[in-house]
């Protein structure tokens, strides 16, 4: 829980666009020093220039969050300039789809590297220094927010590689929450699970490593991309609205943060969990939108 953000430090990965940039703008408005981390240099520079203009201290670093070495260099630089960060937003993410057996090893390495290992590195490198700061000062407060996805809670077909990474982030963050409760009341954790929100994640190909970029997409991967682009582009909740929910969760020490809280959005989670405890087979993830599932099956079986 952090009630007063002024003069505190936020580390944000994936900070050049989407949820990361939206959260950075709120943090700057609340007087926080910023560490902006992204792999896309031009977008990061634009974000740095904008937020430095708000009159707060800004450190911007081009970092591949999948790289333990690069993240270690980042953590050292943050410690040297700002000390222990108060808010760590492990948010960098990339999207990828297709039938689960179709993805190449390079694709698995890329998606798990950014979406999962990026969070792992953020936790393992920043949480210890946050705990040290908390131990040294009873008034010190910190919070970690990890970005997963509704895909980590509902296993929609034709996007298994993404589901796998995000499900791991869900479990990691829930475990982090419990582990922190064992040792301190001064550092909290939250889990962000967005649904369809217009961000740049559908343009992840712009930052794909060459080994991944040269792979020719399968028909299922092309269909997945098209369907997700349509869903994301029609999303009615903005990244700014999600960022406001993130900060509210940090203020209130609330763990689960959903972009969409309607019965339709959350219904599949409830149905999935209920099927588990009743020892039933996995539910149809398109039960609330059967026309989508019918179209996907038709496209794949006719291909």
Image (cartoon, helix red, strand yellow):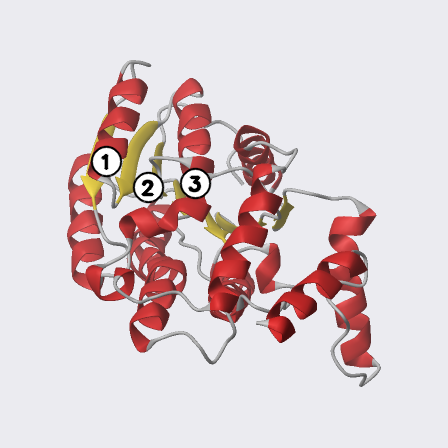
Q: Quadrant of residue 283?
A: bottom right
Q: CA distance from mark 2 to mark 1?
A: 7 Å
Q: Position of residue 4 (x, y in %)?
A: 49, 27
Quadrant of the image containing the N terminus: top right
Q: What is the CA distance from the residue labelled 3 to the residue labelled 1?
A: 29 Å
Question: Which of disc 3 and disc 2 is earlier in sequence?
Answer: 2
Q: As rendered, which of 135 and 228 lies closer to the eye?
A: 228
214 displayed left or right of 6: left
Indicate left or right for 275 with 299 as reference: right
The location of residue 287, given as percent across then percent down, is 81, 63
Question: What residue sits 36% from the left and 71% below the top?
Answer: 108
Q: How many marks?
A: 3
Quarter of the image with the C terminus in it: bottom right
Is 196 situated above or below 153?
above
Residue at x 55%, y 63% (from the top left corner): 170
**Residue 85 image label:** 2
* Proximity of marks 2 and 1: CB atoms separated by less than 8 Å: yes
* Residue 200 visible (yes or no): yes
Residue beneath label 3, please?
A: 200
* 169 relative to 7, above or below: below
Residue 56 versus residue 288 in the image, above or below: above
Percent across and percent down for residue 7 are: 35, 25
Badge 1 density bin: few <14, some 14–19, many ≥20, Cα 10 Å: some
Q: Quadrant of residue 120?
A: bottom left
């Amino acid at each position: 829980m952090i009630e007063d953000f002024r003069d505190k430090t936020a580390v944000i990965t994936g900070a050049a666009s989407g949820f990361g940039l939206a959260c950075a703008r709120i943090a700057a408005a609340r007087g926080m020093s910023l560490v902006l981390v992204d792999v896309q240099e031009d977008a990061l520079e634009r974000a740095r220039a904008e937020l430095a203009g708000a009159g707060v201290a800004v450190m911007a670093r081009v970092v591949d969050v999948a790289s333990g070495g690069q993240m270690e260099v980042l953590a050292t630089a943050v410690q040297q300039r700002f000390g222990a960060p108060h808010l760590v937003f492990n948010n960098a993410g990339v999207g990828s789809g297709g039938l689960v057996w179709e993805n190449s090893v390079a694709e698995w390495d890329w998606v798990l590297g950014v979406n999962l290992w990026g969070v792992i590195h953020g936790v393992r490198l920043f949480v210890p220094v946050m705990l040290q700061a908390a131990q040294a000062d009873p008034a010190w407060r910190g919070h970690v927010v990890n970005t997963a996805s509704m895909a980590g809670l509902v296993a929609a077909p034709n996007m298994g590689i993404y589901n796998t990474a995000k499900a791991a982030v869900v479990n990691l963050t829930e475990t982090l929450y419990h582990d922190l409760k064992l040792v301190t009341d001064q550092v909290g954790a939250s889990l962000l699970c967005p649904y369809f929100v217009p961000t740049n994640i559908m343009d992840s190909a712009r930052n794909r490593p060459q080994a991944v970029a040269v792979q020719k997409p399968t028909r299922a991967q092309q269909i997945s991309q098209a369907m997700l682009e349509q869903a994301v582009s029609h999303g009615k909740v903005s990244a700014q609205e999600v960022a406001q929910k993130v900060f509210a969760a940090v203020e209130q020490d609330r763990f689960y943060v959903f972009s969409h809280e309607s019965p339709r959005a959350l219904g599949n989670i409830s149905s999935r969990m209920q099927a588990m405890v009743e020892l039933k087979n996995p539910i149809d993830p398109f039960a609330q939108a059967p026309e989508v599932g019918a179209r996907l099956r038709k496209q794949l079986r006719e291909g």
